[in-house]
Image (tube, rainbow, N blue to C red):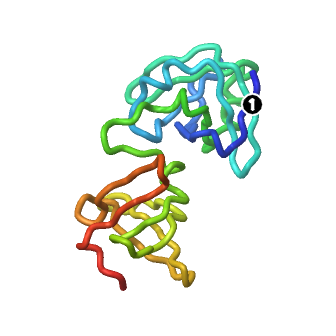
Amino acid sequence: MVHEDRARLFAVGRIQTSHGLKGYLKIKSLSGETGHLLRLKGVQIGTAGKLVFFDVEDVRSAAGAVLLKLAGVDDRETGDGFRGQLIWVGREEASELGEEEYYIADLQGCLCYQGAAFIGRVVAVPEGGGGDFLELESREGKLLIVPFSRHFVGTVDVAERRIELTEAYELP
């Protein structure tokens, strides 16, 4: 398998702990969906830009989580070494998007406008207690926060890399 570069990979799960004596890993889905995880044949695991590819030997559902058996991870102690690391896959293996759902990677870099006025470029999509936010960097380098809700965000055109803010959004 040809390994994809990180810009084309999506984090789909976090390894919580090892499970059982044979090296299974308990995975928490980052999207809340698990169907796509149950079809995995190979994954990349790692953090901070260091990824390692593993073939998937077995995968199954278990009480709100997914159990993943990787080739070469054959005991509990080895599995414990992966705790907290992310599972990365290609776009085609990530969770399918519903209507008005977006991958964070697709939103980052989009340009935000309000009518003809440029507001800023999306640099991050942090999660808050009430939902997600768009973190924008203005032309002047100021960071602006926009709640990612219908009230403030009108249209999102990922293909055109453009987000239109509603009139409800007021510049600080």
Residue 13's spot in the image, x, y percent?
53, 37
Residue of label 1: 3
Q: SS of the residue at dot 1? A: loop
Q: Circle 1: is it few (<14), some (14-19), or many (20+) Cα within 10 Å?
A: few
Left or right, residue 32 beside residue 83: left
Residue 83's place in the image compared with 143, above or below, is: above
Name which residue type carries label 1: His
- Residue 9, by quadrant, is top right
Look at 33% across and 58% down and name the residue there.
Answer: 131
| Quadrant housing residue 146 | bottom left
Quarter that holds the N terminus: top right
Placement of 90 over or under 165, stated as above or below: above
* In this view, 42 is above or below 166: above
Q: Residue at x 53, y 37 (%)?
A: 12
Q: Is residue 3 left or right of residue 92?
A: right
Q: Nearer the viewer, residue 98 or 54?
A: 98
Q: Position of residue 41 (x, y in %)?
A: 61, 18
Q: Is residue 88 left or right of residue 165?
A: right
Image quadrant containing the C terminus: bottom left
**Image point 44% across, 76% down: which residue?**
144
Q: Residue furthest front?
A: 116
Q: Position of residue 141 (x, y in %)?
A: 57, 81
Label total for image: 1
In the rendered image, residue 110, in percent from the top left (x then y), is placed at: 50, 59
Looking at the image, the residue that sits furthest to the top is 57
